[in-house]
Amino acid sequence: MPTINNYSNDNGKGNPKDSNHKEQETNESKKWLFPFILVTSLFFFWGFVHNLDPILIPHLRKAFNLTDLESSLVDSAVFIAYFVMALPAGYVMRKYGYKSGILIGLVLFGIGSLLFVPAANSLQYVYFLGALFVIACGLTFLETAANPYVTILGPAETATKRLNFSQSFNGLAAFIAPTVIGPIILSGKNLTETEMASMSSTELNTYLASEAASVKMPYLILGLIILAVAVVFYFTNMPDVKENDNEGGEGSSFGSALKSMKLRWGIVAQFFYVGAQVCVASFFIKMATTTAGIEEATAAKFLGFFGLAFMLGRFAGTFLMQYIHARKLLIIYATINILLTIITITGTGMIVVYTLIAIAFFMSIMFPTIFSMGIDGLGHNTKIGSSLIVMAIVGGALLPPVLGLISDATGSIQMGYLVPLICFAVILLFAFNGHKANKA
């Protein structure tokens, strides 16, 4: 019998070919392990700096006596950079490979972080915005490279599992950044306009300088760490894959891609989703201090729970999608968030804080779900469609200033949350209509 003959040939020692194959797989795993660890660290780092923005907004508002509209320009500086650099980053990746893109991203990230030191010394708000823009340019390169790069660092059959594992560190950073760094940056000193008016110019300048200076050490350390990581990347032997664009296919174009109703809806929905996410997170601390009357440092800790809820929501949503179709789950989550946002607008006390944290949980699945629904059925136009949906994150630059404008005009930050309310309504419409077949 064949099985008996096989065993007799092995002399009880097993098949040498199988042993060699297993040994080869082990060597391959060791080869990919350190590069995978390095790339996974990027998910943590960009998640970390992104989740410092909601800390920066109330801090800079106080340090420079800004209106809500002016403070929202922090988000604008970040997400305009994503919009501007998305296509150049993709070009670099295709022409020079993922490793080159990562190195460029890390250098820009590190330099932008170090620029916080002269920005704080200058006491000029515009320099902070410039530093944030440089950081975000670097993050655009990192995010464009790291997501697909993780999928090639190992066997193809475990690519999705590796990507989900790496993305979990982004969620971990969303919890750690505001919880650990928030209390360092936020002094807890909140002077009224009357108190500031009663201070001498020397006293006022000293106060503002001390507020601005609190960001120097965290960003200086972050910048040095990022540049050190860049050096490690440079000297690490990593597979420097250049993207083959053949799958783009002949006849692919922006015009033909935009004939897809799914893609058009996806672009609109992603614009409003990112706008909603940034609005809710960026003004979380002001909402918490205003409606619940808690201190900034305490609000920063609750912001950490906001990030934790977002991370847990993604895991829960992924589990539920095994039993509930993604589009139906999006309908349910969008409806829940509409109701929760109404509570944040009309509620008082700690119920508003808890409601905001709940919104984070139900927002968690929206970006990837909208993305996958938007590019469904595009075929050779998939890459173009993906780029357009990524560029739609410019909603994070344009919608927070609208919230700030409403808040300044009405004197109520809660009224500003009409903006995310409208955003979730658009997402609900997308969930109902965005699944329709492409139109030629």
Image (spheres, rainbow, N blue to C red):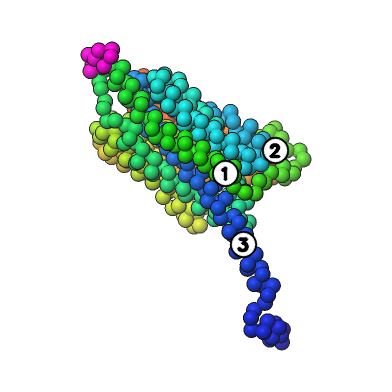
Image coordinates for residue 405, horizontal then vertical, percent: 40, 21
Image coordinates for residue 218, horizontal then vertical, percent: 39, 34
Ranked by sequence position, the earlier of labels 3 and 1 is: 3
Who's the residue at 33% across and 35% down the image?
184
The overriding secondary structure of the stretch rendered in magenta is helix
Label ID, residue 27:
3
Residue nearest the observer in this picture, 230 or 39: 230
Name the residue carrying label 1: 233
Name the residue carrying label 2: 95
Q: Amino acid at mark 1?
A: Phe
Verify whether residue 198 appears in magenta.
yes
Residue nearest the observer in this picture, 344 or 332: 344
Q: Nearer the viewer, mark 1 or mark 2?
A: 1
- Under circle 1, the secondary element is helix
**Magenta span:** 194-203
Crowding near the residue tagged with mark 3, few <14, some 14–19, many ≥20 C-alpha atoms within 10 Å: few
Who's the residue at 63% across and 32% down the image?
88
Instruction: State the image quarter where residue 362 is shown.
Output: top left
